[in-house]
Amino acid sequence: MLMLCRPVPMFATISALALATATMASPAVAQATAEPAGAEAGASAPEAADVDSAQDIVVTAQFRAQNLQDTPLAITAMSASMLESRSFGSVTDVGQSAPSVTLRLGSAGFGKSTQAYIRGIGQSDYNFALEPAVGFYVDDVYHASLFGSTFDLLDLERVEILRGPQGTLFGKNSIGGAVRLISKKPSNKFEASVEGTYGSFERLDLRGMINLPLIDDVLALRISGSSKQRDGYVDRIDFACANPALAGTLQPTVTPTGSKGCKVGTLGGEKVRAGRVALRWTPDTAVEVNLSAEIVRDDSEAAADSLIHVNTSAPALVAYNNNRLIPAFGIPFDNRFATDPYVSYASYDSKFIGRSVPAVNTLNSDSFSADIAWDASDSIQIKSVTAYQKSSGRFTQNANNSPLPVALVDNQVFFKQFTQEIRILGEIGDFLEWTAGGFYFESKSGIGGGVTLAASGIAFDQNDRVKADNKSAFVHGVFHLTDRLNVTAGLRYSKESKTYTFDRTNQPAGTPFFPGGAFTAPEAKYDRFDYKIGADYALADDLMVYAQFSTGFKGGGVNPRPLRPALAVTFGPETIEAYEIGVKSQFLDRRVTLNLAAYQSDYSDLQLSANGVDNLGLPSIIIANVGSARIRGFEAELRVEPVEGLLFDASASHTDFQIKDLGTAAGVAGGPSLDSQPPGTPKWKLTGGVEYTLPLGDAGSLTPRFDVYYQGRIYNEYTNNPIASEPGYTVVNGRLTYRSPEDDWSAALGVTNIFDKFYYVNRFIQAGSYIFTGQPSRPREWSVTLRKRF
């Protein structure tokens, strides 16, 4: 196993490289001009980030406009044109290009969620009783639930991914990092665009935008919308129809017909409509008001899901096969149903209790926000961000992917949240830039529908309710000690609480699932201080080194899936102490950009979820704080523009995760070991891309681009079960773009997964630990996109 060296030599190596690079830096080239210290990017320079060049990207990770290369943070930023050139369509795509970052679609049992991991820390479960480890923000508005976080990249200015704990400056605490989506604001000029894409699986995407200056320099309106749909890529097949000799007494539900055969439907199909309206009011130079409303209507099919393996020797399954399935249907549940990753035999019914559900994965979302900025003086700005969001959806999973009644889940969920953030930004001469503020959050959510675990004799309807709140205050300052040396310090106080009410009814009996009926678990309640201290020094105009220490936490909660009241226990926060040093450099007349970071994190009180079977033979799922780990890693991002029109970019990261103490998990059968690796985190991740813009004179230009993404083996849970792990793989994408001479229209041919590499996006061990399922990768796909600007 490859191990990183000790932190002091590793940091020294990075520092030595920085000093060597200083000799190549170009001090004659001035850095890009940032906005005044009290201003936030986007308000006064919304167009800056639309240039496909790293040195031109202005970010607001510290809520002041800063050139990306001047920001002393490990941050990956991508402008709208960079997203387009890579054929990125959703937030999960963006994770491909960022080191130490995994962003992937949630498995079928977790609905419309993004499973996010940064530097070995993340969260896969959408359940509202749990806190995300990575924070998602859309225009400074925090999204508190993984459910509903599969954001479309609609009319964006840029995306920022911040690595490492966040929380002493803005929003809500995030232990792993943050993903910020920044939309294009209404501007004072007319513009419009329409775009259409057609491709594999009858894909048809439509997008449109119009920007209207209603009153010059005072009022502007921007409206954008999108529609996308495509067929599913996993076939649902009637097992008895396709395999009559293996079906026992199961009767087919369809008759084989032509090319359709025994197909009853598909999984993974999409049908999404979304719209956004933004209004920008600037009555004078001191006030800016941005109002926005967004709506999403997603009526997609159930997520792509297929059976990988059945552990037929599991005692619980042996008993169920012998006592129920074989007598009833003449066949057991076994690996006859695990045939092709692009085939599912799911019937979405549970024959023993007569329950059936539709194969759906839907989301209805409405978001409203008001962002008000007031320059109270030349040196003080007051910022208020108020937002309300609500979402609901239904996602179903036939977890055994067979027509036999084993496991069927119907989740019907809702989530509502209100957030209010106040920030005061100020400066004291050229010496200090400071920010002080407060954040308030409250949410109400619920989980309905039904759960049928026929193999365990469990079937119930649920009407669970969750309430959560967070109150925090923070102060942050950047001290400019010299023209080249800055010191940063931040402090945050957070107070959180969460309650969970369990209300479940046995089916078909209609009796209370828990003795005594519905009950509310003990409240999860805690508070803490977090802080950050850092320094950055400009060795040359285009070479900066920085170092920082920060703390963070991921909130605690309540075990959301107890089968007995005694298991409805609370668990506390995870905590982290993170050390980081980095280098940001440009040289050879800024044709080369090289950013490096190295870090060590001391990670404590890990929230581990254990799936198993208790001494009563029932599935047992519990979450508890156990032990500690040490995480070390390094990251590199390179961008080279050797000649006009030719661009190379690459990134690399290595994550070394070592559990130091298992705590109460030590010696637990089927639990983690000291050698366990974290879920969602490959040790190595490498990316590379190349593009060349070929001028065609008066005929416009042609730009081919190729991207290669590699990630090492990923485990999906802490036991590191090999069947639930995904070997390393490499994916290659390509895009050929033609632009007209005036750049008012373009056409692009894109191919993703060019070499048709198969892998599982994620794998999952179902409750009971004998069913292994996974979400198969999308096969090679092509698309043609036409875009017109007005």
Image (tube, rainbow, N blue to C red):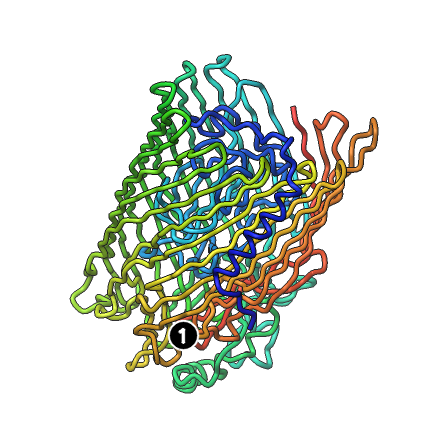
- Pinpoint residue 259: horizontal percent, then vertical percent: 69, 62
Dot 1 falls on a residue whose secondary structure is: loop
Residue 138 to residue 709: above or below: above
Task: Tell me how many marks there are.
Answer: 1
Question: Residue at 29% of width from left, 63% of height from top?
Answer: 559
Of the pair 622 and 350, the residue shown nearer to us = 622
Residue that numbered label 1 is attached to: 672
Judged left or right of residue 446, residue 343 is: right
- Pinpoint residue 310: horizontal percent, then vertical percent: 50, 78
Of the pair 461 and 88, the residue shown nearer to us = 88
- Pinpoint residue 465: horizontal percent, then vertical percent: 27, 53
- Quadrant of residue 732 in the image? bottom right
Residue 732 visible, this orientation: yes
- Pinpoint residue 780: horizontal percent, then vertical percent: 68, 56
Of the pair 558 and 435, the residue shown nearer to us = 435
Question: Residue at 63% of width from left, 40% of height from top?
Answer: 586
**Image quadrant for the N terminus?**
bottom right
Residue 182 to residue 359: above or below: above
Question: Residue at 23% of width from left, 54% of height from top?
Answer: 526
Judged left or right of residue 566, residue 478 is: right
Residue furthest out toward the left: 516
Q: Residues within 10 Å of mark 1 (few under 14, many from 20)?
A: many
Question: Residue at 46% of width from left, 40% of height from top?
Answer: 296
Residue 84 visible, this orientation: no
**Image quadrant for the C terminus?**
top right
Judged left or right of residue 685, residue 354 is: left
The residue type indicated by label 1 comes to Pro
- Quadrant of residue 81 in the image? top right
Residue 670 to residue 784: above or below: below
Judged left or right of residue 654, residue 363 is: left
